[in-house]
Amino acid sequence: MFTVYIYVLDTLADWELGYVTAELNSGRFFKKDAPEVSVKTVAISKEPVKTMGGLTIVPDRSIRDIEVDEKAPREELELLLEAGRCAPTSSNSQSVGFTVLDQEFETLRPRIWKSFARLAREGGRKLLLRRYESYLAHPEEPDTLFYGGTQMIAVTSEPPIDGALALANMELMAHALGLGALYCGFAVRAIDGDPDLRAYFGITEKRKLDGCLIVGRTDLRFHRTAPRNPPRVAWK
Ligand SMILES: Cc1cc2nc3c(=O)[nH]c(=O)nc-3n(C[C@H](O)[C@H](O)[C@H](O)COP(=O)(O)O)c2cc1C
């Protein structure tokens, strides 16, 4: 999936765009397996725009909201770190370590996938290997390890509960900022299973990798939380 932005402004010649937007949006003549296109309007602000044909368009985005590469800006990543930093730690040890894959995310993605595939092969996990093959066929598309995320924060700590608490805080902050966030246990296993990756992320016998939070911009908005079972609770 990728997004085509249409810049809209007052007096827009609305008839000129009609054919192309209809085909991009419906995709009815795309070749088989072509990625879907999301069509969005963008303008100088989100104020309604009047076309030359007299139609009113409320822009989906203001240009201020758009990062061309759709990555989370550094200030937002810093807010995630701030949320992680403020989480409680046992004995106030503050041992939690963060590695932010921002510039190097795309370089590390194939290496993490490779380790994932080796573990899947060794464990005879055919379905997981199929995920790797799909990724190899279209490495530029969102995959089933990182789901289109653009950055990753790996969290290490000495008592693992500290890292887990930091991750939970960071996920809440991601949602508050409107970012998508995914805990990726598969990435944790893949990193843990490769000595070079372990060294890259600063993992040692004492310092474990507690979790990897994948983040990225998303247009999705959730109107309720995911349904959960009743609590497994013993009132005593
Ligand atoms: C520690 C942890 C590891 C996870 N690892 C993965 C993963 O590797 N891949 C994945 O697709 N989802 C992963 N998830 C996401 C869960 O599958 C997801 O949170 C769960 O299905 C509940 O959905 P919700 O997050 O919408 O509530 C992980 C979640 C947690 C808490």
Image (cartoon, grey):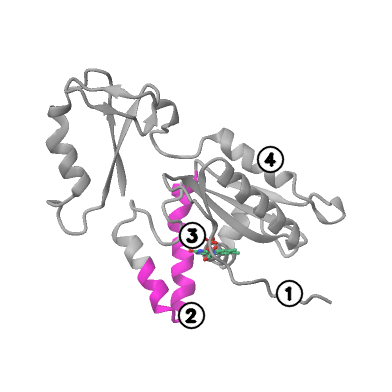
Q: Earlier in the sequence, mark 2 or mark 4?
A: 4
Disc 4 is placed on an element classified as: helix
Q: Which residue is mark 1?
A: 233
Task: Compare marks 3 and 2 and give the one earlier in the sequence.
Answer: 3
The secondary structure that most of the magenta stretch takes on is helix
Circle 3 residue: 112
| Residue 175 is inside the magenta segment | no
Give the CA distance from mark 1 to mark 2: 35 Å
The C terminus is located in which quarter? bottom right
Mark 2 within 8 Å of ligand 1, using the beta carbon: no
Which callout, 4 or 3, points to the residue nearer the camera? Answer: 4
Give amino acid for label 3. Answer: Ile
- Three-letter code, disc 4: Glu
Q: Nearer the viewer's eye, disc 2 or disc 4? A: 4
Instruction: State the separation of the CA atoms marked 2 and 4.
Output: 38 Å
Left or right? Give the position of 139 relative to 118.
left
Viewer-nearest of discs 1 and 4:
1
Q: Which mark is residue 123?
A: 2
Q: Secondary structure at mark 2?
A: loop
